[in-house]
Image (tube, helix red, strand yellow):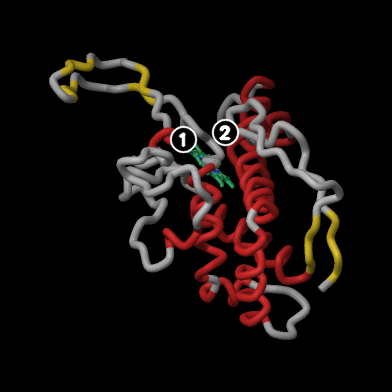
Amino acid sequence: MRAREDGTAGFDLSENDIIAIVRDITATATDTTFNTLEWIMSELMKNPNVMAKAQTEIRQIAGKKTMVTEDDLNQIEYIRAVIKEAMRLHPPAPVLVPHESTTTVIIHGYEIPPKTKLIVNAWAIARDPQSWEAPEEFRPERFLGSEVDFRGNDFQFIPFGEDRRMCPAINFAMVTIELAIANLLYSFDWRLPGRDLDMDEGVGLSVPRKNPLYLIATKF
Ligand code: HEM
């Protein structure tokens, strides 16, 4: 706002531009990260064996530290697999972001003209039984010792997109998520206030839980 008022922005910055920037920050950064954290915790509550293994891993790595810090993260092999598996089942942007073709391309004999809107269903791709064994099951072990990653080279798993417009914040987002989850699992034990936990999806560009996740934390 100040840059707009004193002219130091160097370009016209309208109210609409500012609204768009704020929406960009919330939609691309905050919502994706927050929703991912909530789905990871939901899957862990549904899968107590996985929760136990993840907690054992981080408690062995961090030892008696007050908090998990970034230098611990290069050792969290199992938790990283948990995060990947949660992102496979709940990609924060299930249909990525619409793209537009610039030239004529032929795909499987179909001619796609320029300026065609392309919407990629990353959600369906990540549950395709041709690529994934038991795709509906939450099995972090599938990523242990596997080369499959989300950096855009493995087309069966593209939560961050897969081309030149893929998420520019992939490294920042992953460190944020790893650090948050590792600390939640390190410092607390978790239980549900009730007996059951639904996994219904809400609506949004980044898909949230339909109902909020309420958990009871006990200091470890
Ligand atoms: C779990 C976390 C995140 C996921 C899964 C995610 C995923 C994505 C996806 C799928 C796209 C669209 C790629 C495409 O066009 O095909 C995207 C774009 C983008 N993301 Fe992320 N994102 C995450 C976190 C973040 C964070 C934390 C930031 C910023 C700090 C961010 C900034 C952006 C921006 C600016 C774009 C638009 C890039 C462009 O101009 O095309 N993202 N992200």
Q: Earlier in the sequence, mark 2 or mark 1?
A: 2
Q: Assign a secondary structure to mark 1.
A: helix
Q: Please, is residue 56 above or below residue 110 in the view?
A: below
Residue 82 at x, y percent in the picture:
55, 59
Q: Which mark is residue 35?
A: none
Question: How many marks do you count on the picture?
Answer: 2
The residue furthest front is 195
Q: Quadrant of the C terminus?
A: bottom right
Q: Residues within 10 Å of mark 2 (few under 14, many from 20)?
A: few
151 displayed left or right of 42 = left
Q: Assign a secondary structure to mark 2.
A: loop
Q: Please, is residue 205 above or below residue 38 in the view?
A: above
Q: Residue at x 46, y 33 (%)?
A: 96
Residue 76 at x, y percent in the picture:
55, 71
Residue 15 at x, y percent in the picture:
69, 21
Q: Which residue is mark 2?
A: 10
The residue furthest bottom is 64
Q: Which residue is mark 1?
A: 123
- Residue 27: quarter of image: top right
